[in-house]
Image (tube, rainbow, N blue to C red):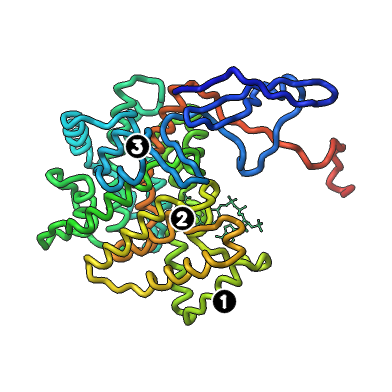
Amino acid sequence: METKMDEIARIELDGKTIEIPIITGSENEKALDISKLRAQTGYITLDRGFKNTGSCMSAITFLDGEKGILRYRGYPIEQLAEQASFLEVTYLILNGELPTKAELESFESEIDHHTLVHEDMKRFFEAYPAKAHPMGILASMIVSMSTFYPESQDPNRSQEAFQLTIKRLIAKLPTLAAMVYKNAVRHPFMYPKNDLGYIENFMHMCFAMPTEDYTPNPVIAKALNKLLILHADHEQNCSASTVRIVGSSQANLYASISAGISALWGPLHGGANQAVIEMLEMIQEDGGDLDKWIAKAKDKEDPFRLMGFGHRVYKNFDPRATIIKKACDDILDQLGIDDPTLDIAKRLEQVALEDEYFKSRGLYPNVDFYSGIIYRAIGIPTEMFTVMFALGRLPGWIAQWKEMLDNGDPIGRPRQVYTGENARDFVDLDKR
Ligand code: CMC
């Protein structure tokens, strides 16, 4: 990682000049290193929602929100989405380099080796209500895995134990996600078939039935491969930051990933993919009056927001959304599906892109705007959409967690500006 630390910024504070080191990243991103500011001056910085705060130095993913650039380990997302397999990208994100043919084959075979989950985990599913949200079950299942592998509980124990935990997570998340799906539709669980590829095996565990032959449709497998790659990492987003902060207390990897799944669930983050489809269906059922819904989204008194629109970092376009929009057209075409929500989504995008409110705020479709339409077309129920996001994001979460430990980052513990009552004496109950 190339960083320069020879520049200094100076600020005037309480009549003193304070020198603050400037850090420059390998893509010339500049940061003021304020880590000693409080010790030097008594001041902290305030940045609600961390809109302008770098929490770490990272060599995994680069994104430039103004130019719409996204790269994993230097490789452009457009090339990876078109040419790589999800496990290849997983290897790249975790190890920093693309695998050779032999390395990839060995990685794939190690993952195959760990796809089964402990039989006792099947019993957990019996306890959930039929309408339980898949993300709630998935987060519980992942943290529960730590109880089956007590050696994983100390993150510093050994490289070997740690590598095994990584492989178990990558291998078992699709199995558990498929079990969540089968539980929701009340179908029997299907065991993994390890002669299938990673994506095809997931499709088999979701869509096969014990009574029928099942061959995964290659068009669907290709679409899923692309979607998972597009979601594989996104630097310091809400769930990755959660994974890092939980892991920074030296909680184990399963616990940290489970926390990431919970953070992802929210509709402002990964849960937006479910919220977008629900919004498009609502607009359709309401008669399709787009002007009405655009006006609602702009009205500050109205809680309605255009789901799948806007991004903390992308202010011109989200490169993932550009790829997904094209994939959406192709897949629906290849599967011969005519989905009215795609038409609504495209018209909504057009109206919003021409509207001054959205233009002036840099609000564009994000990764979640079109992804749900693809999931729907390939038979994934709406409440499972965010589980699909989690499947894709897993390598990123693991790499962020590992990098945090490797870099020796301290425990995450922000400060605050206190705005409550000043000290006062306790009043006895009968005098209040
Ligand atoms: N609809 C209407 N207005 C919006 C929207 C929207 N979707 N998004 C932002 N705005 C407005 C917001 O009200 C604010 O207006 P003003 O300056 O007048 O107060 C301005 O645009 C800036 O928005 P913000 O909320 O300050 O921006 P943020 O960076 O805090 O939030 C966001 C980013 C993604 C949470 C937000 O754009 C949003 O809620 N979008 C809808 C939910 C969504 O699609 N989330 C998925 C994000 S991509 C997947 C992932 O998480 O990686």
The amino acid beneath tag 3 is Tyr
- Comes first in the chain, label 1 or label 2: 1
Q: Residue at (18%, 31%) from the top-left corner?
A: 106
- Dot label at residue 402: none
Q: Is mark 3 on a helix, strand or loop?
A: strand
Q: Mark 3 points at which residue?
A: 75
Left or right, 105 with respect to 226, comes to: left
The amino acid beneath tag 1 is Lys
Cα gap from disc 2 to disc 3, whole angstroms: 20 Å
Q: Quadrant of ligand 1?
A: bottom right
- Comes first in the chain, label 2 or label 3: 3
Q: Quadrant where the N terminus lies?
A: top left
Q: Is residue 82 visible?
A: yes
The amino acid beneath tag 2 is Asn
Q: Name the residue under label 2.
A: 366
- Comes first in the chain, label 3 or label 1: 3
- Dot label at residue 292: 1
> Which residue is more in the foreground, 203 or 325?
325
Where residue 318 appears, as percent x and y from the top left, is 45, 51
Where residue 166 appears, as percent x and y from the top left, is 32, 32
Q: Which quarter of the picture shows residue 111?
A: top left
Q: Residues within 10 Å of mark 2 (few under 14, many from 20)?
A: many
Q: Residue at (47%, 62%) from the top-left corner?
A: 275
**Label 2 beta carbon within 8 A of ligand 1:** yes
The answer to whether residue 321 is above or below residue 79 is below
Q: Residue at (25%, 38%) from the top-left corner?
A: 88
The answer to whether residue 164 is above or below residue 72 is above
The answer to whether residue 265 is above or below residue 120 is below
Where residue 377 appears, as percent x and y from the top left, is 29, 66
